[in-house]
Structures are given as C-alpha cells and as structure tokens.
Image (cartoon, helix red, strand yellow):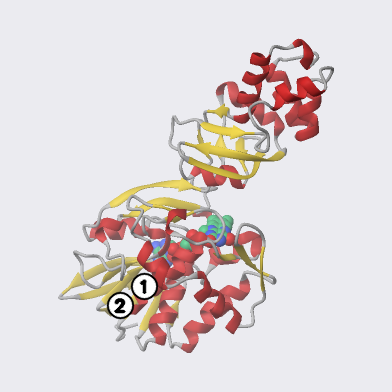
Amino acid sequence: MTDQAHDAVILGAGAAGLFCAAEAGRRGRRVALIERAEKPGKKILISGGGRCNFTNIHTAPDRYLSANPHFAKSALSRYTPADFIALVESHGIAWHEKTLGQLFCDGSARQIVDMLTGECALSGVDIACGQEIAEVTHVDGLFRVRTGDRTLSARSLVIATGGPSIPKMGATGVAYDLARQFGLKVIEPRPALVPLTLGGGDVLFRDLSGVAAEVVASCGKAAFREAALFTHRGLSGPAILQISSYWRHGQEVGIDFLPARDGDWLIDAKRATPATTLRALLRDALPDRLAATLADRLALDGDLGNRTDEALRQAAARLGDWRFTPNGTEGFAKAEVTIGGISTAELSSKTMEAKRVPGLYAIGEAVDVTGWLGGYNFQWAWASGWAAAQAL
Ligand code: FDA
C-alpha cells in the first residue's frame, strides 16, 4: 500500500495508543494506529483478572515512580479518574470499587477494549493490526513508518508500544530502540509489580507456598499494608508486588507479620496469661503453617511466663520487621509493568513531545513513569495519551 495522508501515526494499540488515537481523532486529526498483534488492547483484556482495574480514585503523583517525581503531575491533573469514569459511564459500563479506590468493570475487560475501539471508529482512526514495524525514518519534518505491507507518513509520531513486561503477550522493547534512534535517553528498564524470589537462609519459607497473610511490607521508606503470599519461588501478593517496584538487588525487604500489634504485645500477653506460649499466640493471629514456621525460627518454646521481657521484646521486634533478602525477581516474564523507560527529561510534561525532536511523542508505559498496583498504570496511560492528543 502507498503512503496515506495522516496527521499522526501512533505506534501500539494498547491502552495509551487507543485512547490517544480516539482523542486526537475526536479533535479532527487524521490518525493511523499501528499494532503488531492481530487485535488491539491485549493487555487490557487480561488486566484486573479479566475485569480491568481501569483507574484508581486515589490517583495522585506520589503514587508514581519516576526519576522525576514531578513529571506526571501536569498530565494527571488535566485528565483525571473522574474524566475516565464519565467516559465509562457514557458507554453504559457498570463498575464497582473493589478495595483501596480500585475501580473494576462489573462485567469484563472486553467492555473497555470495545469502548476504546468504538471511540476510535467514531473518530475515524485507521487501525492497522498485524503490522510489525520494520523501519522508522524522519526526513524534512516527516516521520515515515514502514511495516510489513504499509508505509505511512505524518508530521507527528507517537510511541505507545509499552514496555517489555510479559513478552509472551508480544510486549517488546521497541519503544527504547526508537527512543535511542532519535537520541533520547532511556532510564534502565526493570521489571516491577513482580514477585520476589528467595534463596539462602530464606529458602525454607518456600515450604509455605500458598499461605497468605495481611502484612506490612517495606523497603527503604516505602511500606504497603496488603496481603503477602508465599510461593514456591519466594514472595508475591499485592504487598510484595507493590514493594518490588522500590526494591533493588542487594536490599532487604522487611515484613511486619502482625501490623496490628505494638512492640510490647508479647510482654502484655505474658502478664495477662503467663502459661500461654508464643506458638499458641501466633496460631491465633496467623495461618497455622506460617505461625508454626515463625515460632520454629524464633525458638522461644515454653510458657511466656518463663521468658524475660527483653527476650519477648526482641521476638516482637523480629515479628514486626522480619528481614528477607530476595535474590531476584521473577523477571519481565511475570512483571505487571516495567519501571524506567524513556527519560522524562527528554519530554514536555504538558504534551509528552520530545523537546529535541519536534513531532515525536511518547506515552504510557514506554515512559519512565510507573504507578502503584491498583489502576494507577491505566490512569497514566489515559492521562499521558490525552495530554499528547491535545498537542497532535
Ligand atoms: P500496552 O502494553 O498496553 O500496549 C502497547 C501495545 O504496543 C501493545 O498492544 C503491543 O502489542 C504493541 N506493540 C509492542 N511492540 C510493538 C511493535 N514492535 N510494533 C507494533 N506494536 C507493538 N494496570 C492497571 O492500571 N490495572 C490493571 O488491572 C492492570 N492489570 C494488569 C495485568 C497484567 C497481567 C499485566 C501484564 C499488566 C496489568 N496492568 C494493569 C498494567 C497495564 O496493562 C499497563 O500499564 C498498560 O497496558 C500500559 O499501557 P500502554 O498502552 O503503554 O502499553
């Protein structure tokens, strides 16, 4: 096929690309959307356990990680969760809040994909799926994108190809290749919202595979009170996924197994019922297998009445901040998102346009902005896509 006249070519029909295309089309721009998969929005379809946690009502810039923590402020404030909820409702999609401000479809994630592709159709967006990007060039202010069977050109090019998390679903690092091709810096991409693996002395905890408990997981200054899950490789569950975004190789992760108890709770228990044991108290508070493992590790058998206050204080302190040193993560294969990406220093926070390459934009997960678990990453995809669409 020969060149077509478009104002913008958007690469990647995921959350950010679909939303940006629909919005730019609505503003009268002639948009082509190029996707390598056979269908658009594949990650949306599997998101939120098939129900798509499409936003979070507590969205705020401090729930995003980036080398520049201020970068996301502008876009997040101009396209908010309320804006997306209004769009969802205008399509008659029923939703509910599950927990912690996380909004899910009552029905299925398919409704969000249908909504976005429907908006694209209304806006006259030309969506081309099954198109591998073969080459991108930029000559005389015109970007030219060559795929297997098409060549498209436009004055604006939007990189919306996401990050390399879950390569089995077709995720690629092409965003970074394109960024580098145009001289933009890339912050080292790492897997995030990902299970952590345990080895060494912690390996015995793998025997607890399948056991979950509400904990506070912490790393450095970050702390999350949610469920943690022991797995056959290490640690997972929402609290661990959250903390994994902050964790770096060599760092310890602290787990408070009893977040509701203060530092003197064992001493109080000794005074109240001296004949009780640590094992029995832990069994009351935690799943049996976890209680037994922690009691074994603390080796504080016998009646609490026979233990010194100092020994009990130390045991309580250990239970309140149990230290694990993960030996790694389960990697991009299991990571819900990628942290790092195209450096925000290269982009305008208002329009997502590359400062040094007029007409080139980057949005969504491709950019070095990564949200917490719980709908924050889709909100960034919508907000950054909307910001770029206003400038296209
Ligand atoms: P996204 O990955 O969605 O889209 C990129 C698109 O580019 C894809 O369609 C891809 O095929 C295409 N592409 C890649 N390389 C290409 C190439 N070379 N040529 C052409 N096209 C190419 N977030 C959230 O807020 N709530 C949730 O419930 C979940 N749940 C969830 C579950 C699972 C299992 C995962 C893996 C992730 C989530 N996420 C999430 C994260 C969320 O899916 C993610 O942040 C967004 O999809 C990012 O949107 P983007 O459009 O930037 O990338």
SS at circle 2? helix
Q: Provide residue 370's location: percent of width, then percent of height.
A: 44, 54
Q: Which residue is drawn at the image coordinates 77% and 16% (left, top)?
A: 304
Q: Which residue is drawn at the image coordinates 28% and 59% (left, top)?
A: 179
Dot 1, crowdedness within 10 Å: few (<14), some or many (≥20)?
A: many
Q: Is residue 362 above or below residue 309?
A: below
- Considering every residue shown, the one lying at the far left of the view is 140
Indicate which disc residue 391 carries: 2
Type of amino acid at the residue the image marks with label 1: Ala
In the image, is the residue at mark 1 within 8 Å of ligand 1 by its beta carbon? no
Horizontal relation, residue 12 to residue 281: left or right: left
Residue marked by disc 1: 387
Q: Provide residue 251's location: percent of width, then percent of height.
A: 45, 31
Q: Total of numbered circles in the picture?
A: 2
SS at circle 1? helix
Dot 2, crowdedness within 10 Å: few (<14), some or many (≥20)?
A: some
**In the rendered image, is residue 278 in sight?**
no
Q: Quadrant of residue 359?
A: bottom left
Marks 2,1: beta carbons within 8 A: yes
In the image, is the residue at mark 2 within 8 Å of ligand 1 by its beta carbon? no
Q: Quadrant of the N terminus?
A: bottom left
Q: Provide residue 325's location: percent of width, then percent of height.
A: 52, 28
Q: Nearer the viewer, residue 166 or 38?
A: 166
Q: Which residue is drawn at the image coordinates 38% and 59% (left, top)?
A: 366
Q: CA distance from mark 2 to mark 1?
A: 7 Å
Q: Nearer the viewer, residue 273 or 242?
A: 273
Q: Quadrant of residue 259?
A: top right
Q: Provide residue 301's location: percent of width, then percent of height.
A: 76, 14
Q: Is residue 267 above or below residue 354?
A: above
Type of amino acid at the residue the image marks with label 2: Ala
Horizontal relation, residue 263 to residue 56: left or right: right
